[in-house]
Image (cartoon, helix red, strand yellow):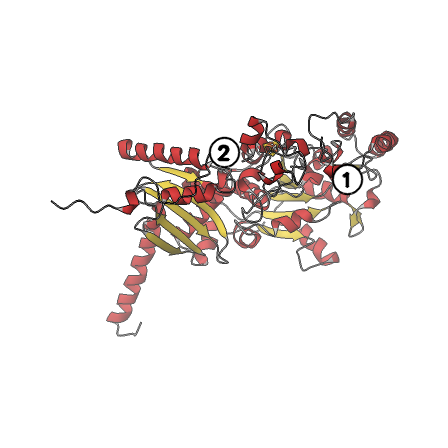
Amino acid sequence: MMAPIADPRFSPMPAGMFFSASVGNALPLLHQIRHALTALLTGGTETIIDLGAIPFGPGDEAVLEETLGTGEVHAVLTAMGESHVRETAIPGVWRIDHRDMAGALQSRFVEITMMPDILKTQREDAVRGLKVLEDRLAALDGGTPV
Amino acid sequence: MKTRPLLSETMAAHGVSRRTFMKYCATLASVMALPPALAPRIAQALERARRPSVIWLSFQECTGCTESITRSHAPTIEEMIFNTISLDYQDTLQAAAGHQAEAARHQAMKENYGKYLVVVEGSIPVANPAYSCFAGRSNLDVLKETAAGAAAIVTVGTCAAYGGIPHAMPNPTGARAVSDIITDKPIINVPGCPPIPVVMTGVLAHFLTFGVPELDDLGRPKAFYGDVIHDRCYRRPFYDKGLFAETFDDEGARAGWCLYKLGCKGPTTHSVCATVKWNGGVSFPIQSGHPCLGCTQPDFWDGGGFYKPLSVPTGDYRALAAGGVGVGAVVGAAGALVGRGVKAEAARKHETVDAHDLEKPS
Ligand code: SF4
């Protein structure tokens, strides 16, 4: 039987990782994420962590980034500036960075969820979309070019 | 009275999608230091809100607070002005001047009487009101007139909140805080020299969505001033281990050790500098290697020296300052007498700090 192909996303720790977490806040945060992921799997409880409220020191961001890694999904919203929604290499753990139209960072979150709400189509937008589609079809039926 | 459009109507008119609105609310929750899960409630509150009229008064100050808020990145002041508030008077930013500007203030007051928000930047000189006037009127007169029809007052900066640098010994102008003069309106103090931009916009957003936030005993929103910097400082583990920088360029300073011995006031200073940080979250003074000056606290200027550790006695500056504040409730001539009374004492005790002092180990 062939040995299963190792998935680098699930290796214990990325090779050569810079790890200076002994006095920083990345390690407690990563443990909080671990607890939140457990809660998601056992009771379906979703968690949102506002990274703007965490006192990060130099090096903490690198520890967080490298420990969570990069996953399969990277969606870019264009909504008054770009928002990057990335699933990390720990499925169920997402990074969400909101930027304004000048590209400046507005807020950033870690979401522990199966699907971040911001990716879903909002009902109000779908209602508006239906009206737009009906108008366009009416225009087509009437022979008016859209 | 003109009916202002609901925020949801304004946003819909500009073609803003619900998803964009959710993004905006998520950022607002972060800015207001509220749990991210409250974003949907912020959205609900915002949908029902009308853009409030805001009158911004600049008194005895350096305009640093306006400089700071115009650098707010989330939300930007432009977003606040055009989407969230109606800034009807701000004599530094507005195009109008002189009689036209004053007419704009009076019109905003008349049309929104009892509902508008007053933002005050700067202290009010009461020893001799002529120290700071505009349009031929003293700051004291304009404050009393404008506050009369306000729903609430937000003081931005330590000068408006507690007197700030103009109030520092020997307080030559008899500078007073807004709360020394106006006692019949809700006052939200947003101190800092200057305050962090997003804290100012966050407080305005909180007022708009949920009204006056919960305040501490110095009138500051607990969401932003509930913790001392020390509790959230990334250098705290060094403090706990007793590892202190002794000078600004020793091994400890280079290794990022605690700045307590270099005069850090983080243990007694309430602010979110260590988490929200400055310049779009890039850094804050302690991260840049400089001790906290304690600028969100009353009378921080009279603490006996920015580079003295908190444990070093500072004489009776604080007692003098507290006395000044207490008597300051009786404004006018009495304020002037207090200022003159402490002047000689303060001059005798005053110590200057120069570059050589910075090099001395404590
Ligand atoms: S640098 Fe200041 S705020 Fe940070 S741990 Fe040391 S004393 Fe506390």
- The subunit carrying tag 2 is A
Q: Which residue is drawn at 65% across and 32% down?
A: B265
> B168 or B306: nearer the eye?
B306
As helix, strand or loop, the secondary structure at mark 1 comes to: helix
> B335 or B199: nearer the eye?
B199
As helix, strand or loop, the secondary structure at mark 2 comes to: loop
Viewed as shown, does residue B100 lie left or right of A31?
right
Mark 1–mark 2 Cα distance, whole angstroms, equals 32 Å
Q: Mark 1 points at which residue?
A: B356
Q: Is residue B156 above or below residue B317?
A: below
Name the residue type under label 1.
Answer: His
Q: Could you tell me residue B278's position as x and y percent?
A: 58, 45
Viewed as shown, does residue B1 lie left or right of B303?
left
- Disc 2 packing (10 Å; few <14; some 14–19; many ≥20): some
**Extreme-left residue of the structure:** A1
Residue A23 image label:
2
Q: Could you tell me residue B76's position as x and y percent?
A: 55, 52
